[in-house]
Image: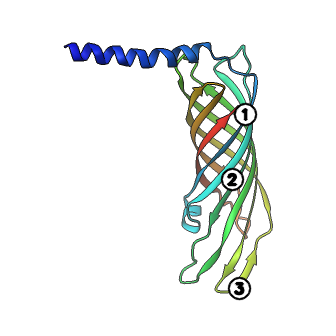
């Protein structure tokens, strides 16, 4: 029983400063951040592309009168290596440059770790290039409307915030025959905001 009391006391000493820091830290109305991570192609796109990477930057607007609501503008770049087509060897990549406006709903609790959900829409500009069996190819850049939704966890630290986030992105695209063929991927990112 004595050991349990000591463990509870140690845990309380560890948790109180984190909660206290989260309660006293003020959210800036405007902050800037950067993200990086993996970009996972899914669906039909997952059949054509391998795991890729994503990098981005954003600006966050957090109205002080609405602590559970924030608005974020993202600029992202995702890139994936293309897989082979049948027995043909493909040496190439596909990439997307995105500009998205998002709404974030986050927990208004006083804890140092806060969950949130995010959803948004914007413009996704994509292209691909490379070679198939030694023949070079390059697609024209296409601009498509896109939406995204996901969630994450924010970690309030002294002077800055870190976060882990995963989203599902859908680009409303068409194939070469003008038939709807949406492109989907899941960026899983780590970010820092100042």
For the point 63% across and 30% down, the residue is 161
Quadrant containing the N terminus is: top left
The residues bearing labels 2 and 1 have C-alpha atoms spaced at a distance of 19 Å
> Would you call the spot at circle 1 few (<14 residues within 10 Å), some (14-19), or many (20 or more)?
many
For the point 68% across and 20% down, the residue is 27
Which is more foreground, mark 3 or mark 2?
Answer: 3
Quadrant containing the C terminus is: top right
Q: Secondary structure at mark 2?
A: strand
The image shows residue 160, relative to residue 177, as above or below, that is above
Could you say where residue 129 lies in the image, as x and y percent from the top left? 72, 72
> Would you call the spot at circle 2 few (<14 residues within 10 Å), some (14-19), or many (20 or more)?
many
The image shows residue 118, relative to residue 178, as above or below, that is above
Count up the numbered dots: 3
Quickly name the residue at label 2. 171
| Mark earlier in primary sequence (3, 2) | 3
The residues bearing labels 3 and 2 have C-alpha atoms spaced at a distance of 28 Å
The image shows residue 176, relative to residue 123, as above or below, that is below
Q: Are marks 3 and 2 in contact (CB under 8 Å)?
A: no
Please tell me in which quadrant of the rendered image residue 131 appears: bottom right
Quickly name the residue at label 1. 72
Could you say where residue 9 lies in the image, as x and y percent from the top left? 34, 13
Quickly name the residue at label 3. 135
């Amino acid at each position: 029983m004595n050991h349990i009391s000591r463990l509870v006391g140690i845990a309380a000493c560890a948790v109180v400063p984190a909660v206290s820091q989260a309660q006293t830290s003020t959210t800036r109305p405007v902050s800037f951040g950067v993200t990086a991570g993996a970009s996972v192609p899914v669906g039909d796109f997952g059949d054509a592309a391998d795991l890729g990477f994503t990098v981005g930057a954003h600006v966050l607007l957090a109205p002080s009168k609405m602590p559970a609501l924030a608005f974020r503008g993202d600029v992202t770049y995702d890139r994936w290596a293309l897989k082979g087509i049948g027995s043909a060897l493909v040496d190439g990549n596909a990439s997307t440059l995105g500009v998205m406006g998002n709404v974030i709903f986050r927990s208004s609790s006083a804890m140092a770790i806060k969950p949130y959900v995010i959803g948004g829409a914007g413009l996704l500009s994509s292209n691909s290039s490379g070679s198939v069996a030694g023949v070079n190819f390059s697609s024209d850049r296409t601009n498509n409307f896109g939406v995204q939704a996901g969630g994450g966890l924010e970690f309030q630290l002294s002077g800055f915030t870190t976060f882990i986030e995963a989203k599902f992105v859908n680009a409303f695209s068409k194939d070469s025959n003008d038939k709807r063929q949406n492109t989907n991927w899941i960026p899983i990112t780590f970010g820092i905001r100042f």
